[in-house]
Every structure is written in C-alpha cells, then in structure tokens.
Image (cartoon, rainbow, N blue to C red):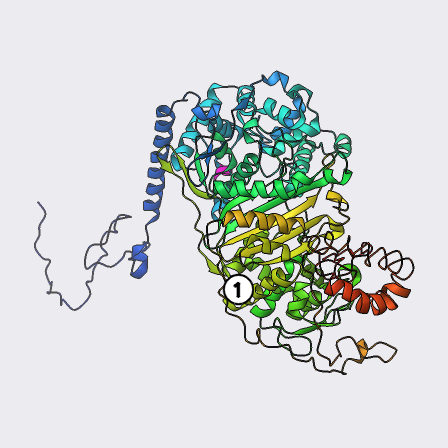
Amino acid sequence: MSDQSRPPGWTPRDPDTPPEGPPTQPQKPGTAPQPGTAPQPGTKARRKRTGWRRALPTWRMVLGGVLLLALLLGGALVAGYLLVDIPPANSAATAQSNVYLYSDGSQLARDGEVNRVNVPLSQIPRTVQEAVLAAEDRDFYSERAVDPKAMVRAAWNTATGKGTQSGSTITQQYVKNYYLGQEQTINRKVKEFFIAIKLGREKSKNYILEGYLNTSYFGRNAYGIQAAAQAYYGKDVANLTTAEGAYLATLLNSPSAFDVVSHPQSRPRALARWNYVLDGMVKKNWLPAAERATTQFPEPGKVRAAAGLSGQRGYLVEAIKDYIVDRKILDDKTLAEGGYRITTTIDRRRQNAFVEAVDEQMVAKLDPEKRKADRVVRAGGVSIDPATGKVVAMYGGIDYTKQYVNNATRHDYQVASTFKPFVFAAAVENDTRTQDGRRITPNTIYNGDNKRPVVGGRIRFAPENEGQVSYGNITVNTATDLSVNAVYAQMAVDVGTAKVKDTAIALGIPEDTPNFPPVPAMALGTLQASVLDMTQAYATLADHGRRTPYTFLEKITKGDDTIGLPERTPTQAVSREAADTTTSMLVSVVDNGTGTAALAAGHPAAGKTGTGELDRSAWFAAYTPDLVTVVSMMGQDPDTGALESLYNALGEPRIGGGGYPARIWAAYTKTALEGSDPVDFDLELQPGAGEPPPLPPAQTDRPEETPGDGTPPPWVRPTRPVRPTPPTGGQDNGGRDNGGRDNGGQNQGGQTQGGQDNGGQDNGGRTQGGQTQGGQTNGGTTQGEQGGTTTGTTGTTGATGGRGTDGGGATEGARPPSAFLE
C-alpha cells in the first residue's frame, strides 16, 4: 500500500488558484471530462446542442429510422406477397349490362349483352401486337411486372394537376381487367401490385399479353381485340392491317372519346394518338420508316347498335355515358363492367312528345324517293328545365341503328343567328355604348344597311343581311325581330368581341367550342356549338341569368352502393337585368318577328331563329318561363357523312329556323306543358329599355368614313327610323305557303308578276323594277309594300311575304351569295 502522506514542505492549496504540478492523465476519446477538469491538449471538446438544433434528430437517429422503415417495408412486401393469392377471374371479366331508367323509375334501356370472343396470341398479327405495345407499354418484354418509378411519377403528375395517369404496366392492367376491377381505391391498387408481381413470376409474357388483348375494352361494347376488329372493321383480327391495329390500340386510351364515327369532334385527338402509336413503332424498329410515311388513317365502319338501343334509346344512352365519363363520375372502362342502375332525368311523357312532334311536323313529310334533297335531312333537339338544369327530353335522330351520330350533341354545324342574343346580353352586362356614346338598349338606333362596314374593329368586315336587304336606321329590337346581320356585327365590335365570348361562355357555351374566335363574324353565329350547349345557354337566360349546369342523372347505384354525383351549384352568369332585357326582345321575336310559328304552343315564349352557312342548318331556340327547348334541322349526306345544304328539302327552296324547327318546337312545347296554365315572364329590364327610341345624333367627325361623293356616312341620319312591318309567319304563314310564294310571293307579285318574271329579276327585279323602279320604289315599297306589308304579311308579296332564311322581313328572290346567312 502506497504512502498517502504529504511530502515535506507542502502547503495547503488556495481553492481560488489553479492547481500546479504534473498534468493529469488524458481522457479517453469519447468520454466526458471529469467535473472541474479542463480539456486535455490534442482533444476536442463536444459542443452541446442548443436552441432549435436540439429539436433536430441526430444522424444516428436518421440512419436508425431509415433502417427500421426499410425493415418494415421489406416485411410488408414479403407478407403481401405471401398473403395475396392470384384470385379467380372476376365477374366483370364477363361484363354485366347497365340498366337505364326514366325519371319515374321505368326502364329506358339496357345496354346490351357482352360482346367478347377470346383468340390465341398466335392469331393476332405481330404488327397489331406491337401497335398495342407502342401505345401502352413499349418495354413490356424487358421490364418487370410492376414499375414503381412509373407509379410514383403518375401519382405525382396526378397530384400536381398534370392529368390523370395510370403508371401501370400491361401486366398490372391485365390484373385489373381480369382479376380485380376498375374502381380507384387504395385496396385495389395494393392487391393489383402484389398479384402483378406474382403473376409476372409465374406466367410468361406471352400469356399475359394474350390475356390483356382478350380482356381490354375497346368501345362499341367490344371486349377483346377480336370483338373490336369486328365492331370497327367488320373483319377477324387475323386480317387487320398495321394501320387498323394502330387505331384499335389508340382506342385503349379512351374508347369512347376516340371513336371518330360516334364522336367526330374528337377526330384531331384520335389522329394525334394514332400517329403517336405509329411513331412509337418506328422508334422501337417494329415498323420501317418508309412504310410509316405511306400509312393512311383507316376509317372505321359505322356503328352497329344493339337492337335494344333502337329509336331514341341509343342516343340517350350514349349521351348519358358521355356525361358520366366526361365528368369523371366513372371512367368508361369501369362503366363498361356493368351492373349499374342509372336513373336519369329524362321525363318519359315529354320524351315521347318530342319524338311525336318531330315525326308529325317533319319526318312524315319527307319523301326521299321523290325528292333527293330529303335524303340529307336530320333533326336534333334538347329540352331542359331551367330551374333545375335537368335534361327532360332529347331527340338525337330518326333512329340510333340507322343514324348513329347524335344530332343533339354533335359540334359541326354553325348556330347562326341564335347566337345574337348573347351579343346583346354582353352589351347590357358590360353597360356598353355605341361608337358615338349612346347606351345600348333595345331602343338604341343602329344602321341596318346591307354590307355596311363595321366601324371600330381591327378586321374589315361588311356583312350581308339576309336577302341583301338594307333597312336604314332601325332599333336593336327591330334588328332582333328581323335578325339584321349588319346591326349585330357592329354591336359585337362596340361591346368588344372578347367580352362577347366571355359572356357566351358564362351562359354555358364551352370555351373549346369549334370555330369560336373572338372576331366580328362571331355575332352571326359562326361557332359550332351543339344543340345541348345552346339549350344550356338559353336556359341561363330563361332563369334570369342564373346558370345551373345541366345534368342527365338523378342517381347511380350498384348493389347497395350509391355513386356520388358532382355538385351543380347555380351561379349568376350575367345580371338579371342583362338576361331579362334580352328575354324581352326575344319575346318580340315570337310575337312580331321571325319566330311567330311558336305562338301555336299557346304559352308566352321568347325565342330566336337562325340559319347556318349555305343553309346547312336551321335553328329555333326558345323558352317559356319554365321550359327551354332548342330544335335544329341539319343537312348531311347519309353515305359520305359530308355536311349538305337543305336547299329544296321537303319541297321548299329554303329551310329557315322560323319554319319547320319553330313548328316542331311549338308542337312539342304545347304537349310538354299540357295541363299547366300559361305563365307570363317576370322581367326586370335595364333603364331605358322601355323608353321610345331617341333620334341618333348627327356626327360629322369621321371624315375617313365619309363616301367620296360628299354624302353623309350611313350613321348620320337625323330622322326617326320607321320600323319595317315584320312577317306574320315566316315561311308558312306568309313566307311561302299563304302568300309568300303562292299568293303574292312568287305568283302575284313576288316573283311571277313582279318578283322575278315581270319585275323581279328579268324585267326589273333588280335593276329597273326590282330595286329602282318596281322592286322598292314602284312595286317594292309603294305597290309591293301594299301587297307585301298590308296583305302580304298574311302572305302576299315580295318585300315581306317572300322572306328567306327565317321566314320574314327580307325579300327572298334569288339565294343570297353570302357566306354568313342569318
């Protein structure tokens, strides 16, 4: 034991002085220094974590967490692989039918039996297989059964709004088609993941591709590549060309949208996808570039509808399917699985009334064997309850099994003058003034001369009026009654074409409607909106500017489950003042203008007529306070599908909106509202709408617009305009039958005595007597007006009785050469 005594001479240490003597032994690395000792030379003192740093995990903690997570994930993958077995084929692999019901619960239609024929992979041409791979999974043979990177990328793109993407391999899609279902749930995705891994380990790639091609949905109720080959090209899959195979592969992405026959408006998208498939085949060296360069798009055949979808049922079912898919209530593949009970908003009584009205007023009068022009006649119509937005009736065509394109939803005909009310609504909504500072109201005076150049626009535009009639100074109300192009083209520029387009979109016209640029010609209705779109927009006007998105659906159920439907919250699209003032003018169109045939409905109505370019379409859009209906007649070659003029159809040289469409509207509306009392419109008008029209101020500050002969420009006319006497029946009550062509329009003075033969076109119809001596001066205004305005409004003459496009107000004579017909 060592001596612990103190050495001689030792003195006690002052506790306030540092110790002396030899240094203490250094601390072992990683051990904390003893209290009261200083760090040893060559060692680093550990800095304590202070402040917010104390909340951060250490790297040891992070590493431990990652390892733990990897362990748990690995365990979950192993457990999932062991626990999830490959199930038997699901019932949806032999798809069920969907049942569609009227609003009262009675059956409307059943969408047919399953169309499926399985074929071995050896019977499917190699190029067709490769086209499918180019479209859906180009690395199928070299990749694993699942692609986690693609799944994460698809989930990220979907979450960030870049579009819904599957991220699934063909193996995963086959699992979904054959073993599981199309529902978008986490549980299904997890099962799909593990079944695909197990299937990829147990089955060959060829087995999986064969199963995928035999279970995929291609549209037209075709399940599998063999059924698709028959449905689209009327041949067995073994006889498909590379181009045809590429089109069928295109359909896998969106079967309903890419059918260029049923949905001609989707042709550009379908062609883009078809080209993408072929280009992918070239990139993978499956198709020579030279062959690709000469490959033409293979037009698919007509739709052969199931017998159970004949008549209007097929049109209704297709429109309802499109509504469900477009609004992402169900995707088309999920809907095709079947088993859904779909209760629609279609009112059975009104639906039957619509069909009867078209049959009685138009179809029964067609005679295609005697009149070749009758072969091209088609009709479409939609009826909506403006308070609820429910589509209560729709007419798609004569028979879905004969005319497969739905005339109520197609987007390839101009809406013509039925667009004009949107221009006026935009003027009121934006409190617009004319070029000389006058507020635009129904009583604002415009110059309505034929080919009057539009003032203030960047594009030179001088539209023709129907029949090339010049009206001089007229009110907006009169211009609406008579559908004067010159007035509305100028008004569109006064408002601003961009604002007009914004108003139309707010009312319900889709922004992506074809041929919808904001230019002055838009006022004449050059856009190609569907009948359904126009009914939606007019329903907004009818409901005092409140827009309720339309719907076809009351309820969708499958078993005990109810499928959620999208919210349809009403919004105030335009002010009540703008909508109601527009309605007041449309009431005048029915009472005094080109839409008088609608009076036969026996209910107060507001409406507008219109006729498209080259008479390819004729429209009547109108409403009562509680029912909105749009009817359109269209010309289309039944063999080629080309749009055709309606000239000479039904034995009449011209077809206008005030004729057959208005009569169909009246017959339908009378029956649809049978048992209900007529209701007047409750309108709140803009200030000045009820005041008498003021005199237009004389202006001389536009020398650049003054003609070179020194005469004042057309808007400088300080005289109160005289309203032209409107027609009383368009083409029937005075336009063509009662006097427009028979009693005075052609025979007595319109075309025979003074219209064409004696003074109309030959002896004076345009030069000596048509406009100068007899057409407007001697016979047109003085003698002809007496025959046309006094007795010709019930149908006698040339100036009024022989109305052209919408059946009233403008001399018909020869067909106008204008590209923009009212």
Residue 77 seen by the camera: yes
Which SS type dominates the magenta stretch? helix
Position of 764 relative to 1 (above/below): below
Quadrant the N terminus occupies: top left
Residue 590 forms part of the magenta stretch: no
Q: Where does the image place residue 272, in percent across and percent down from the top left?
A: 67, 40
Residue occupied by mark 1: 574
Q: Residues within 10 Å of mark 1 (few under 14, many from 20)?
A: many
Residue 152 forms part of the magenta stretch: yes
Quadrant the C terminus occupies: bottom right
Position of 523 relative to 100 (above/below): below
Position of 226 relative to 521 (above/below): above
**Which one is in front, 663 or 555?**
663
Position of 247 relative to 407 (above/below): above
Q: Where does the image place residue 636, in percent across and percent down from the top left?
A: 71, 41
Q: Where does the image place residue 194, in percent across and percent down from the top left?
A: 42, 28
Image quarter for residue 706?
A: bottom right
Residue 530 seen by the camera: no
Q: Where does the image place residue 207, in percent across and percent down from the top left?
A: 53, 19
Image quarter for residue 452?
A: bottom right
Range of magenta residues: 149-153
Q: Residue at x 75, y 44 (%)?
A: 651
Q: Amino acid at mark 1?
A: Val
Q: Residue at x 36, y 41 (%)?
A: 66
Label 1 sits on a secondary structure element that is: loop
Q: Residue at x 62, y 66 (%)?
A: 424
